[in-house]
Image (tube, rainbow, N blue to C red):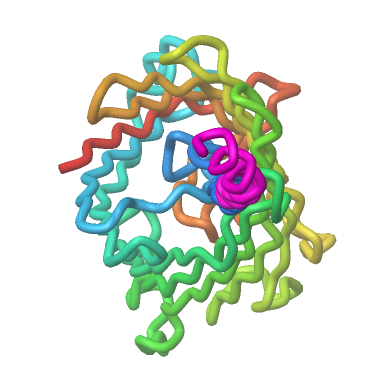
Amino acid sequence: MKKILLLVLFPFALFAQDDLLSEIDTVATNEKVESAFKGLKIVNIESTKLAAKGDLYFIVAHRFGSVKNGFEGLFGLDNAITQLKFVYGLNNWMTISGARSEIAYDFSAKYSLQPQVKDGFPIALVGFSSIGINNILKESNYPKMQFNNRLIYVSQLLISRKFNNKFSLELAPTFFHENFVVDDNQDNTQFSLGLGGRYKMTNHWSLNVDYAAHLNRSSTSPYKNPLSVGVDLETGGHVFQMHFSSSQGIHESGFLGNTTGDWTTGDVFFGFNLLRVF
């Protein structure tokens, strides 16, 4: 009798096993790929990382002056600029922030459009939008200045792929509009294409690089495209980013539109981003 029951139940056991394997495959297929980048920024360019729901970040971004000045400027210790920023994970797909930087007060939102999925969707898509208030335009220099002239708008599509546990890349097509530009030949509406990458060297250290090509810069503009190279150090609730960049600017309009440095002449700026999550 037991043998007969085994023969009867055996086919059902096979079907149950197939169903279980099918469910396991489905779960694996829908698994999100995490940690393409550890920092909220690669170096200057926003990464596809968002703050987790309820997490509050306090970020200090500091850029020293150009090292080219040598002892005269104490290798950049003089003429430094700082950004203070609070970032909050509103939910699992949207991060909001407020900051005071060298050029502007700015308020931004970063939002997930589509995560990278293991054995599924091959890239992560994240949107970034901000509005800034230019604080360096002085009414003494521009008597007809109005509040509207100070506004800066930024919109980015961040496209990243984590190829393996060590290597990630990102593209960042960017639109930014400055209501006031000093160069009369420069369009207020400007476009750039950013490229960044991360290579994990150890469990705590990674090498980061980002670059942005300005696509419609005025032919009379003295500014250049920013190139930045740095490292991330992850220690518990801290991510400490140290880097050299051809841009001293921190706000998008600062490093995308107003980069003055040049790697070929040694005119670069040392800086760091210190992130603390609560």
In magenta stretch: residue 267: no
Q: In this image, 77 relative to 44: left or right?
A: left
Q: In front: 70, or 228?
A: 228
Query: Residue 147: image x %, image y %?
Result: 35, 86
Residue 217 visible at all: yes
What residue is drawn where x is 51% and y is 28%? Answer: 269
Residue 277 occupies quadrant: top left
Residue occupying the far right of the picture? 219
Residue 134 occupies quadrant: bottom left
Q: In the figure, 264 relative to 44: above or below?
A: above
Residue occupying the far front of the picture? 1
What residue is drawn where x is 20% and y is 51%? Answer: 56
The quarter of the picture where the C terminus appears is top left
Residue stretch in magenta: 1-23
Residue occupying the far left of the picture? 278
In magenta stretch: residue 19: yes
Q: In this image, 151 relative to 277: left or right?
A: right
Query: Residue 64: image x %, image y %?
Result: 39, 29
What residue is drawn where x is 34% and y is 25%? Answer: 240
Residue 117 visible at all: no
Q: In this image, 95 relative to 60: left or right?
A: right
Q: In front: 267, or 114?
A: 114
Q: In the figure, 255 relative to 39: above or below?
A: below
Q: In the figure, 24 relative to 151: above or below?
A: above
Main SS category, magenta section: helix
Q: In front: 39, or 99?
A: 39
Query: Residue 9: image x %, image y %?
Result: 57, 46
Q: In this image, 60 relative to 233: left or right?
A: left
Q: In front: 170, or 18?
A: 18
Query: Residue 228: image x %, image y %?
Result: 60, 32
What residue is drawn where x is 41% and y is 22%? Answer: 76
